[in-house]
């Protein structure tokens, strides 16, 4: 009983009110709770001398009185003796016996005894009481366990025995291995009661199979993979030796040892709802299965953009350590639903506030299979030697091989190219309106088993020097960077080039192109090109980007290669590849992917007049379009930067759009006049019924200040054409 010590005085009426509020036994008196008696194994009685026939030599422990006073022949129920507690004012007497109890081996634990109450006290409110039950032996002095029950004189006939029966199996959990059976009498200062206890037994029924497990849960953790958890079997149930987890569909059951509370199950179907039945088993059989709630695996999004319009500042970079730009907004995870390739694109307007300092941008990958352990898989360098506060609309293109079921963590990282005390680099130009230019990390998944969209790539980390150039002739890279494809059906092919271009000779710009030959024609076709400015300064790389697109014919093999030249006749000085880092220079990459022509839209101009075109990638089906804008931007007035933004149009093919929505923008530096920046802007735009603008996407250009003229398109080449200004869309339906 809470607060009642062995042999101590009664603590007052308030304590009894607490007792009565906690305990109820009326329904078990006089044989009214004997429905479970047939289940009791009568051969197992754990109480020694339950009839007190050994008298004063009984093995019961006595507190508050001498054994001879307690074990008496005054009023036995069966045999010659019974136990007598109290009968005097302010009494607290008890008898106790330690029982060898353990949790989990029995399904019932019935305490039975007979009780008689003598005395005239029939006042309501349990002024006197016989408290009994199970307590931890180390705490039975206070009897604070939930196993404390009370018999009040006003609920029992005076001078007559009644039988008591109660299942204490749940209470055994609180004292397993250290259980004390306690009978304790209490009286107050008026008309004391005398309690007689006799024929005490404690019998347990050996258990059958375990009950059901509690709190079953299932959580998808990857394509076809789920984590299933549960808690112990329902209270009072025997301990299991094993658990069996059975999926409702798709594969067979999994069995784990009885000390487990979780399991990861793979090989599950991803196209239908699924539940898991969890069954506990011991030597006596298996219990009832308790199922988890049903769920259906979410399909991995094939396209995603992680975007921020904040401006980021990195101070005091050591020139070696890559730092996450924003791990929350510019980082995310992808779990491959099948083996294939993940096309990664990063965009940022990078610049410096410290002269003679370049900015490095990279993509870090970590995979849960250990293949990538925080590796920077691709990077580019943006030049700051030409001028401070002159952004480079930098891009990174990379293709990552991925395995089915593996999760890949992607994050955009950066650093300075060297340590300069007090240095500062920035990502995000502007502001314009409410935000800065977008910094993006975008991926698109290509499944190896999906013939409708394929991708191939080639990459080199070797630095190259062009040598002498006549300013006209395109020279293939040596060693070459090339890719080949043979489409199974007529479709559209997109070619992407990405490299760091720079010059060691002031005033020389660098041109990068993609040439394509085919099994039908060995004559190279220049499908696209871009120019990187060298007037802004030497040794100041431009993270250049070029894109081209063409229709390809089934069965014809196409080979694309990178080629380059200077923008005018020059000796040595044009270079490709920044760095090195760990012995490798920044990657030079060529990517080719094919897709159904119906899922593409293309707008391209080579005459400087097509700045107002638009594409229409809208479809009634839900999906996402990857929109790629590319332009050579420059100015005739030093200090005027150029901006390119992607908008939804309301009409018109001019530079002055009435834009319904701005999807993103970037800025190209104008530290020097006539020094183009091969700028890129890549966005993932959600389309479908929620976007009824028919997907009319346009490129819009502007200057950061006036006066000053900005230009779109470098060149011209010998044929009079300028570098292409292009807007491509690739629609990816929801999976």
Image: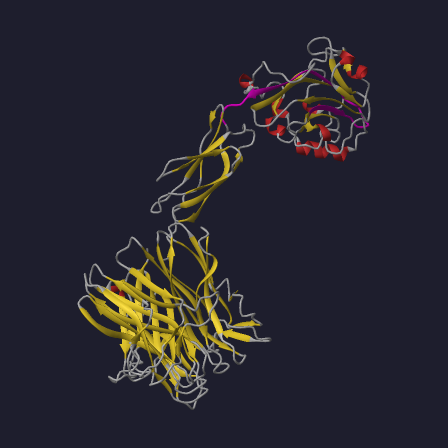
Span of residues in magenta: 180-209
| In-image side of 157 versus 624 (left or right) | right
Residue that sits furthest to the top in the current view: 80
**493 over 106 or under it: above or below:** below
Residue that sits furthest to the left in the current view: 520
Which residue sits at x=38%, y=55%?
402
Residue placed most toward the observer, 681 or 463: 463
In terms of secondary structure, what is the magenta stretch mainly? strand
**129 over 554 or under it: above or below:** above
Query: Residue 493's spot in the image, x, y percent?
Result: 26, 66
Which residue sits at x=60%, y=75%?
421
Q: Quadrant of residue 62?
A: top right
Residue 193 lies within the magenta run: yes
Q: Quadrant of residue 42?
A: top right
Residue placed most toward the observer, 79 or 53: 53
Residue 119 in view (yes/no): no
Look at the image and tell me in which quarter the C terminus lies: bottom left
Query: Residue 39's spot in the image, x, y percent?
Result: 53, 18
Residue placed most toward the observer, 383 or 30: 383
Query: Residue 224's spot in the image, x, y percent?
Result: 38, 46
Which residue sits at x=45%, y=72%?
381
Residue placed most toward the observer, 351 or 566: 566
| In-image side of 133 versus 664 (left or right) | right
Look at the image and tell me in which quarter the N terminus lies: top right
Residue 464 lies within the magenta run: no
Residue 418 in view (yes/no): yes
Structure colour scheme: secondary structure
Query: Residue 296's spot in the image, x, y percent?
Result: 38, 47
């Amino acid at each position: 009983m809470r607060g009642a010590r062995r042999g101590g005085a009664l603590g007052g009426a308030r304590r009894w009110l607490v007792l009565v509020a906690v305990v109820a036994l009326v329904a078990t008196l006089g044989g009214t709770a004997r429905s479970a008696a047939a289940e009791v194994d009568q051969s197992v009685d754990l109480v020694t001398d339950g009839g007190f026939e050994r008298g004063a030599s009984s093995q019961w422990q006595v507190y508050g009185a001498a054994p001879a006073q307690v074990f008496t022949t005054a009023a036995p129920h069966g045999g010659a003796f019974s136990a007598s507690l109290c009968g005097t004012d302010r009494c607290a007497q008890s008898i106790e016996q330690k029982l060898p109890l353990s949790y989990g081996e029995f399904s019932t634990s019935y305490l039975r005894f007979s009780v008689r109450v003598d005395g005239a006290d029939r006042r309501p409110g349990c002024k006197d009481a016989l408290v009994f039950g199970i307590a931890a032996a180390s705490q039975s002095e206070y009897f604070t366990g939930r196993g404390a029950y009370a018999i009040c004189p006003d609920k029992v006939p005076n001078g007559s025995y009644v039988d008591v029966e109660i299942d204490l199996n749940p209470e055994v959990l609180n004292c397993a291995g250290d259980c004390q059976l306690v009978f304790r009498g209490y009286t107050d200062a008026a008309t004391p009661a005398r309690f007689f206890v006799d024929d005490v037994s404690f019998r347990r029924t050996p258990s059958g199979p375990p009950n059901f497990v509690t709190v079953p849960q299932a959580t998808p953790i990857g394509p076809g993979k789920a984590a299933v958890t549960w808690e112990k079997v329902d209270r009072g149930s025997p301990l299991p030796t094993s658990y069996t987890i059975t999926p409702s569909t798709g594969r067979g059951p999994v069995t784990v040892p009885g000390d487990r509370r979780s399991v990861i199950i793979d090989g599950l179907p991803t196209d239908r709802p699924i539940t898991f039945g969890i069954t506990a088993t011991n030597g006596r059989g298996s219990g009832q299965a308790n199922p988890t709630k049903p769920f259906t695996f979410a399909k991995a999004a094939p396209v995603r953009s992680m975007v921020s319009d904040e401006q980021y500042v990195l101070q005091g970079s050591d020139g070696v350590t890559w730092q996450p730009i924003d791990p929350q907004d510019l980082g995310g995870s992808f779990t491959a639903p099948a083996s294939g390739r993940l096309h990664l694109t990063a965009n940022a307007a990078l610049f410096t506030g410290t002269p003679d300092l370049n900015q490095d941008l990279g993509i870090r990958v970590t995979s849960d299979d250990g293949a990538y352990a925080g590796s920077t898989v691709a990077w580019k360098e943006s030049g700051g030697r030409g001028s401070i506060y002159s952004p480079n609309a930098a891009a990174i293109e990379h293709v990552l091989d991925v395995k089915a079921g593996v999760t890949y963590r992607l994050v955009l990282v950066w650093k300075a190219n060297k340590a300069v005390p007090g240095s500062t680099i920035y990502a995000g130009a502007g502001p314009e309106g409410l935000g800065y230019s977008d910094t993006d990390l975008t991926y698109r998944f290509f499944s190896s088993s999906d013939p409708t969209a394929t991708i191939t790539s080639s990459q080199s980390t070797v630095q190259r020097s062009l040598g002498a150039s006549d300013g006209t002739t395109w020279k293939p890279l040596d060693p070459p960077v090339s890719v080949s494809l043979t489409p199974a059906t007529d479709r559209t092919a997109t070619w992407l080039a990405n490299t760091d271009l720079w010059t060691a000779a002031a005033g020389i710009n660098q041109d990068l192109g993609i040439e394509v030959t085919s099994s039908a024609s060995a004559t190279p076709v220049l499908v696209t090109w871009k120019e990187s400015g060298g007037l802004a300064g030497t040794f100041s790389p431009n993270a250049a980007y070029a894109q081209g697109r063409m229709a390809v014919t089934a069965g014809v093999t196409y080979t694309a290669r990178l080629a380059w030249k200077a923008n005018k006749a020059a000796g040595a000085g044009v270079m490709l590849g920044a760095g090195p880092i760990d012995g490798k220079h920044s990657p030079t990459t060529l990517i080719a992917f094919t897709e159904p022509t119906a899922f593409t839209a293309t707008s391209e101009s080579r005459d400087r007049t097509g700045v107002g075109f638009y594409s229409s990638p809208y479809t009634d089906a839900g999906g996402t379009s990857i929109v790629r804008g590319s332009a050579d931007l420059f100015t005739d007035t030093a200090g005027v930067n150029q901006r390119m933004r992607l908008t939804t149009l309301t009409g018109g093919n001019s530079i002055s759009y009435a834009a319904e929505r701005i999807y993103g923008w970037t800025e190209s530096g104008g530290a020097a006049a006539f020094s183009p920046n091969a700028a890129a802007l890549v966005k993932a735009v959600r389309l479908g019924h929620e976007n009824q603008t028919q997907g009319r996407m346009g490129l819009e250009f502007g200057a950061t200040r006036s006066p000053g003229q900005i230009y779109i398109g470098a060149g011209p080449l010998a044929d009079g054409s300028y570098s292409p200004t292009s807007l491509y869309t690739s629609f990816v339906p929801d999976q």
